[in-house]
Image (tube, helix red, strand yellow):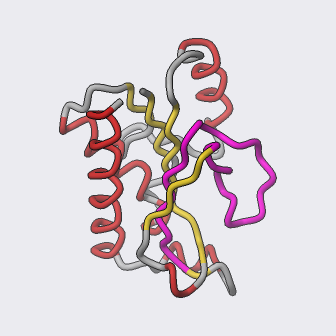
């Protein structure tokens, strides 16, 4: 199993992925983990990770983890998707899907100034969401 944890620690609301990656590494999860607070996967380097995963992890299950925006009623929830996810999908980015499974933490509303929402997100709220995602990912790694 491979976890690809996407986001940047420079923007609190977008830091769910790298927070989860760091937690998974610290917990010693039995899986490959890419994207941490120290070495984040962002729009600038995602293409390199796509190539590396395609080369070295062809037969592995790839779980993509990212923060996203959603309906107001869904803020604070975690959504699982079959078929991966589109990184930066909240910004209507038409990048290719990544992963076999997607884990998305809904950090804000998909209306208004989404970048501003990510920048001013409450750090404790994001940390709690990251812990929730980490528990889901750890369970997935144990049962794979």
Residue 53 in the image: above or below residue 79: above
The spot of residue 130 in percent (x, y) is 33, 59
The spot of residue 94 in percent (x, y) is 81, 52
- The range drawn in magenta is 83-108
Counting every numbered tag in the picture gives 0
Farthest residue, direction left: 27
Question: Is residue 93 found inside the magenta-colored segment of the image?
Answer: yes
Question: Is residue 63 found inside the magenta-colored segment of the image?
Answer: no
Quadrant for the N terminus in the image: top left
Question: Residue 126's image quarter?
Answer: bottom left
Residue located at (57% from left, 45% from top)? 42
Q: Is residue 17 left or right of residue 23?
A: right
Q: Is residue 61 left or right of residue 114?
A: left
The spot of residue 121 in percent (x, y) is 43, 78
Relative depth, front residue between 79 and 41: 79
The spot of residue 112 in percent (x, y) is 69, 87
Question: Residue 77's image quarter?
Answer: bottom left
Residue 101 in the image: above or below residue 114: above
Q: Is residue 47 left or right of residue 141?
A: right
Farthest residue, direction front: 143
Farthest residue, direction right: 94
Residue located at (36% from left, 42% from top)? 21
Residue located at (20% from left, 31% from top)? 28
Residue located at (63% from left, 27% from top)? 48
Quadrant for the C terminus in the image: top left
């Amino acid at each position: 199993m491979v976890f690809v944890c996407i986001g940047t620690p420079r923007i609190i609301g977008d830091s769910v992925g790298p927070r989860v990656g760091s937690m998974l590494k610290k917990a010693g999860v039995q899986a490959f983990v890419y994207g941490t607070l120290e070495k984040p996967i962002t729009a600038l380097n995602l293409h390199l990770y796509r190539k590396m995963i395609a080369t070295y992890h062809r037969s592995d299950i790839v779980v993509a983890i990212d923060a996203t925006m959603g309906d107001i009623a869904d803020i604070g929830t975690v959504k699982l998707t079959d078929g991966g996810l589109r990184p930066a999908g909240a910004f209507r980015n038409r990048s290719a899907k990544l992963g076999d499974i997607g884990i998305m933490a809904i950090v804000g509303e998909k209306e208004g100034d989404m970048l501003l929402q990510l920048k001013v997100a409450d750090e404790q709220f994001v940390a709690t969401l990251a812990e929730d995602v980490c528990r889901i990912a750890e369970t997935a790694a144990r049962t794979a």
